[in-house]
Amino acid sequence: MVPLNKLRRVCSLKRLQSVVATLILFTVLSQIPNENELKSRKIRYDDSIESNTGIENHHSNAFSRGNLSWLVSPEDFFGRLEGGHGRTPCRKLKSMGGQPCNRVVDGHKQLCLDTDVHINPRNCTVYSFGVSTEITFDRAMAKYGCEVHMMDPTLPPGVYKNLGPKMKFHPVGLYSKSKIVAMNLTQYADWQGMINSTLMTYSEVQQLLGHHAPVDYLKMDIENSEWVVLPHMMARNQLAGIKQIAVEIHIDSSKFSKPEVTEYLRGRWSILEGLEEHGFRAAHYEPTRSLESEYKIPGTNRTIFTCGELFLVNKHHKDSNYHNL
């Protein structure tokens, strides 16, 4: 059996550590397009989007979009994320959910209340992929007023039954193609047995729910599958119309000692740049400070965290054409 890749939070001991997470992880890593393939798929947007939102673009040529010569090491990757280079300000940023654990708050996500990306509490929908047993964010968004659809394929039957009128749980996961993975749950509390984990594409999830319009808020915590799901959705323009995205990003530290580490990191960054080309701007990034994500840089006393919460707002959503393919 392939050992589980430990990229989960320290405060996530209640979360399931299952075989399906490993299967999805290694399937994803084998199918993620390389940097050149990603460049060939990019959809160009008018650079005036920056000026239209009143945000000045001070990127130098060395840091311009598409030029990844600056990105060589893991420190470059996470240094730029944490440094907030070119970040779009959200003047009214609110933390939703979360609970204290080891003197930090775990499980929270950001919500932007600015007018241009405001989510109407009287008419809003949230898709929350990857909930496990941490649903404080989902409860907070339901309290805010949204209809919240929680999804996770790695939980035993009957976990979430009495959630309230605005919260619904669906035992499915998000992926770039539909598949069913048999999984033996042996570490989930007192429950043990076999389940069939169902993975669906984004359009299949919407068909399952009878939805035909874009959701307001998309939350993704899908343990490395974000790197294959996001390109799949962007290629079909399925992010159009979504106002805000919270995605937990994971970087495989086992790649850092290999010669292809630069190509690996640039491939990941190209996916993040793809989000920009679809109108999204990073408004907040917070590293997941856990033992599982901690990476000590060889030969130094420096440490980086290879997992973190990236929050983006769609400054282009009013002009987007939504395609549900």
Image (cartoon, grey):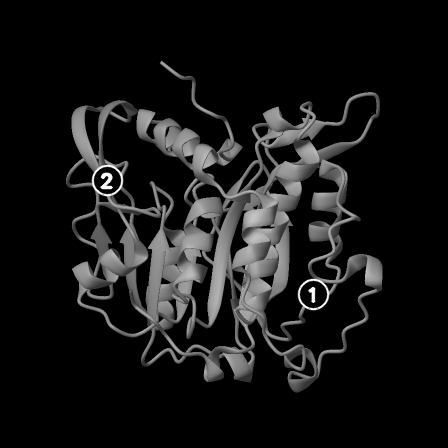
User: In the rendering, at what x and y percent does residue 263 appear?
Assistant: 66, 38
Looking at the rendered image, the quarter that the C terminus falls into is: bottom left
- Check disc 1: other Cα within 10 Å, few if <14, some if 14-19, many if 20+: some
Which circle, 2 or 1, is nearer the viewer? 2
Discs 2, 1 touching: Cβ within 8 Å: no
Q: Between residue 152 and residue 279, name the one nearer to us.
A: 279
Instruction: Identify which residue is drawn at 48% across, 25% down.
Output: 5
Instruction: Identify which residue is drawn at 42% across, 71% down.
Output: 242
Q: Is residue 154 left or right of residue 235?
A: left
Q: Is residue 4 left or right of residue 325?
A: right
Q: Is residue 287 visible?
A: no
Q: Is residue 317 visible?
A: yes
The quarter of the displayed image where residue 66 is located: bottom right
| Count of all numbered marks drawn on residues in the image | 2
Q: Which residue is mark 2?
A: 179
Figure check: 239 above or below 194: below
User: In the rendering, at what x and y percent does residue 251 appear?
Assistant: 58, 37
The quarter of the displayed image where residue 305 is located: top right
User: In the rendering, at what x and y percent does residue 121 appear?
Assistant: 37, 78
Q: Between residue 314 and residue 323, name the one nearer to us.
A: 323
Instruction: Identify which residue is drawn at 29% across, 52% down.
Output: 201
Q: Is residue 115 left or right of residue 64?
A: left
Q: Amino acid at mark 2?
A: Lys
Instruction: Identify which residue is drawn at 41% across, 43% down.
Output: 222
Per the model, the C-alpha gap separating discs 2 and 1 is 37 Å
The quarter of the displayed image where residue 137 is located: bottom left
Label placed on residue 87: 1
